[in-house]
Amino acid sequence: MVCRAHKGFTVGTPKADFLDLGTEFGVRVGDRTDDRPRHDGRREYEWKVTLGLWAVIVAAIATFHGQTLPKWIGYVTILVFAFLWLRGVWVANEKDKTLSLHYRRKAEQVLTNTAPPTEVPFPGTIPWYKQAFGFLLDWSMLFQLVTTIGLLKLAYLFVK
């Protein structure tokens, strides 16, 4: 087995002197197989926005105590939070995971010098129904949504 280092990778391939990763995978192996930095950064903003919304809801309970709030404010808050914020974050994370998996499989095929039984297809877009409602099946998104709905319900109970 011959081991060569190329662009930060140590490649072990049987009966191969050199494996060129620069043409197709040089950038993509390093950038796309590790989606954690993008995901972690997005998650930090996701929770900051969510905790900020929860703080606003709790502050509204104290501020508007004894007053009547229109119900449409709660419904609009839930819809905007769920379908504009949570859904958007979830779709971006899913796309990153799909691309990361694709490039990991391709890189593994190149690094192990194995011929794939079938070509790894480039991932297409996420189906519309999964883009629209898939976030409701993710535990983190569902937790944030249910907690927000619960806080809004408490807000309407205590404000009256």
Image (tube, rainbow, N blue to C red):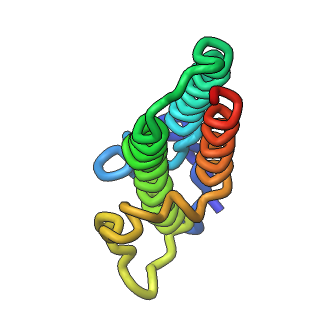
Quarter of the picture containing the C terminus is top right
Q: Position of residue 158 (x, y in %)?
A: 70, 30
Task: Identify the image quadrant of residue 36.
Answer: top right
Quarter of the picture containing the N terminus is bottom right
Residue at 44% x, 57% y: name it. Answer: 103
Q: 43 or 149, which lies in front?
A: 149
Left or right: residue 151 versus residue 39 is right
Task: Identify the image quadrant of residue 112.
Answer: bottom right
Q: 71 or 55, which lies in front?
A: 71
Residue at 50% x, 75% y: name it. Answer: 114
Farthest top residue in view: 63
Q: Position of residue 144 (x, y in %)?
A: 63, 43
Depicted 7 relative to depicted 116: above or below: above
Q: Position of residue 93 (x, y in %)?
A: 48, 48
Q: How many marks?
A: 0
Q: Is residue 17 visible?
A: no
Depicted 37 relative to depicted 10: above or below: above
Q: 131 or 54, which lies in front?
A: 54
Q: Position of residue 133 (x, y in %)?
A: 44, 64
Q: Is residue 126 visible?
A: yes
